[in-house]
Image (spheres, rainbow, N blue to C red):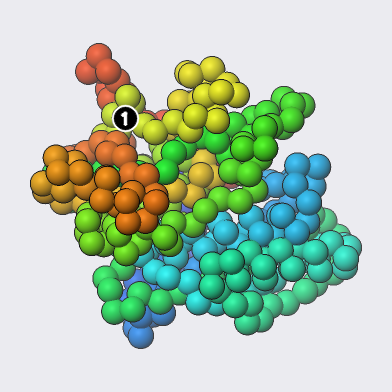
Amino acid sequence: MTLSGRLADGAEFDAIRAIVDGARASDAAVGPGDDAAVLADGTVVSTDVAVEGVHFRAEWIGDAAAGERAVRAALSDLAAMGAHPVAVFASLSGPDRERLVRAGIGVRQGGEAFGASLLGGDLARADGPLTIGVTVLGVLDGRRPWRRSSARPGDVLWVTGDLGAAAAAVATWSSDGVPSDALRDRFARPAPRFAAIDALRTHLDPRAAIDLSDGLAADARHLAAASGVEVVIEAERVPVAPAAVAARSPDDALRLALEGGEDYELLLAAAPSDVGEGADGGEDAVRATSGVPLTRVGRVGEGRGAFLLAADGTRQPLDGGFAHWGAS
Ligand SMILES: [Mg+2]
């Protein structure tokens, strides 16, 4: 299938299609169209941009924290491919040199916390918002990358960690409140799930993965579109973050878990097996060896699109999720 056919609907993806349609063939092993590209030698590369006023606000978190958050979010795309991080490059622009320095230090230190060294970058003075571009490089160590396009009917869907806390922090700030330290931390310091990669390969052997940047609903649609399958999420199984439930109503917390985004957990598809069904504690094995919780959230089926299965057995299209230019 062409890349255009594997991208989900929406204005951002229409723009990506317009850019990549007609691109000349590359000898890269993977890309574009996944969380990261994989070069022929197994190097994994991704790039990301965080814009003040769009992805963060100065009154929410400081410049260094914005830099740290940007690199953590970028690194998450390596984790989504099952790759371990090696290097970081930062491109910073904005009107205030001191702010760029603070953000750059945040990027450097944020990368170093995961073993990725800052190897280069660029600074530019520009009118407009503080803009933090981060490019990350990782390695697969000879292992197979997890693709968005590899989910197959019959696969079981899993998600790491819990969801909705970062969005609950944003919702609280947006209604002029002050989020708890726990909520603020989940927004400012999302955890790329490198610690779980080896345990997941051993105990789950995922076929496909995507990191949850746009929200479980939107990213489930991306996985479904890329794989040409139907994705069904069971509402009662969605691991809603306790901190989000504490700050919002349970219904609102579930909505944030589905649509809020910026959790940077992993959604994984794996063939059903004794372990995959959880019958002999696959979740427990992953948690015991990595410390990362794992929850079975649904199934992959024949068909197209993403659906939410309610406790009463009704299903509805899994709408919502972050979109830069709105849904189309
Ligand atoms: Mg991603």
121 displayed left or right of 84: right
Q: How many marks?
A: 1
252 relative to 321, above or below: above
Report the residue that reaches farthest toward the top: 312
Compared across the picture, whether 230 is left or right of 279 comes to right
Whether disc 1's CB lies below 8 Å from ligand 1 is answered no
Find the residue positioned furthest to the left: 274
Closer to us: 307 or 42? 42
Please name the residue shown 48% across and 71% down the image. Answer: 85
Percent from the top left, x then y, of residue 174?
A: 71, 30
Q: Quadrant of residue 112?
A: bottom right
Q: Residues within 10 Å of mark 1 (few under 14, many from 20)?
A: some
- Name above or below for residue 21 compared with residue 217: below
The picture places residue 70, in percent across and down from the top left corner, at 63, 58
**Residue placed at 80% from the left, 72% from the top?**
124
- Please state the horizontal and vertical placement of residue 179, each as a whole percent of the image: 69, 32
What amino acid is found at the position of numbered circle 1 in the picture? Arg
| x and y, in percent, of residue 197 in the image | 35, 61
Residue named by callout 1: 237
In the rendered image, is residue 157 in sight? yes
Residue placed at 36% from the left, 32% from the top? 238
- State whether residue 55 is above or below residue 320: below
**Is residue 219 visible to the viewer in this orientation of the structure?**
no
- Residue plotted at (42% across, 43% down): 161
The quarter of the rendered structure image containing the N terminus is bottom left
Residue closest to the far front:
288
In terms of depth relative to the viewer, which is nearer, 201 or 304? 201
Q: Secondary structure at mark 1?
A: helix
55 vs 46, left or right, is right
Judge whether 89 appears above or below 299 on screen: below
